């Protein structure tokens, strides 16, 4: 698995890179820090809707909660961030720990919960995927970090109690 992980990471770090795509991925990465983009998105939906207010608020709070749970896993696993010779990461991170990806965890947790509140919430998976793929693209995570984070996020999004 680690060899495939490294090959996929190297491919993502060396292919499809243009200044515009790199800038977009950096912007998405910053927006995803601490689940900020998800909190904002859920609060916008909350303000725009007349139904399920409590559930939308829970979705907004799920983003930082997922980050905290993710960090607890990081502390147990203690996997360092990837290092590719000649290919430094294109972004920064608050910790040197890589597994699982907090961006993927919070993104998939909230997208899953949003879909439970309203089927149109499934549109959020497009953003979750983009945010998550940006992590290895920028050299911040191995692809397996993102996959594990997405799986953890889906579980969190399915088990969080929502007021429906």
Image: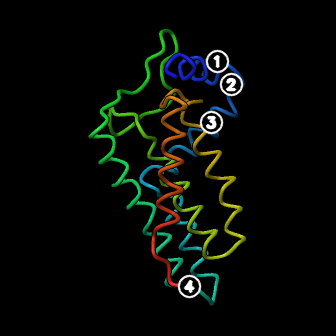
Outermost residue, bottom side: 50
Dot 1 corresponds to which residue? 14
| Category of crowding for the residue at label 4, using alpha-carbon neighbours closer than 10 angstroms: few (below 14), some (14–19), many (at least 20) | few
In this picture, is 80 found above or below 162? above
Q: Residue at x 33, y 47 (%)?
A: 71
Q: Residue at x 58, y 62 (%)?
A: 112
Q: Earlier in the sequence, mark 3 or mark 1?
A: 1
CB-based contact (under 8 Å), mark 3 and mark 1:
no
Q: In front here: 88 or 52?
A: 52
Say which of marks 4 and 3 sits in front. 4
Outermost residue, left side: 75
Q: Residue at x 70, y 26 (%)?
A: 18
CB-based contact (under 8 Å), mark 1 and mark 2:
yes
| Category of crowding for the residue at label 1, using alpha-carbon neighbours closer than 10 angstroms: few (below 14), some (14–19), many (at least 20) | few
Rendered image coloring scheme: rainbow
CB-based contact (under 8 Å), mark 4 and mark 2:
no
Q: CA distance from mark 2 to mark 3?
A: 10 Å
Dot 2 corresponds to which residue? 17
Q: Residue at x 41, y 57 (%)?
A: 66
Q: CA distance from mark 4 to mark 3?
A: 38 Å
Dot 4 corresponds to which residue? 164
Q: Position of residue 35 (x, y in %)?
A: 46, 56
Badge number at residue 23: 3
Say which of marks 1 and 4 sits in front. 4
């Amino acid at each position: 698995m680690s060899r495939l992980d490294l090959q996929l990471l190297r491919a993502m770090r060396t292919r499809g890179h243009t200044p515009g795509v790199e800038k977009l991925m950096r912007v998405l990465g910053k927006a995803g820090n601490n689940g900020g983009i998800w909190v904002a998105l859920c609060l916008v939906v909350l303000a725009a809707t007349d139904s399920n207010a409590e559930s939308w608020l829970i979705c907004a709070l799920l983003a930082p909660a997922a980050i905290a749970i993710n960090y607890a896993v990081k502390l147990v696993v203690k996997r360092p961030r990837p290092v590719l010779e000649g290919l430094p990461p294109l972004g920064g991170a608050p910790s040197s720990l890589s597994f699982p990806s907090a961006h993927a965890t919070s993104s998939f947790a909230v997208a899953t919960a949003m879909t439970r509140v309203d089927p149109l919430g499934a549109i959020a998976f497009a953003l979750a995927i983009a945010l998550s793929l940006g992590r290895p693209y920028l050299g911040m995570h191995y692809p397996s970090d993102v996959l594990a984070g997405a799986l953890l996020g889906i579980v969190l999004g399915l088990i969080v109690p929502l007021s429906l």
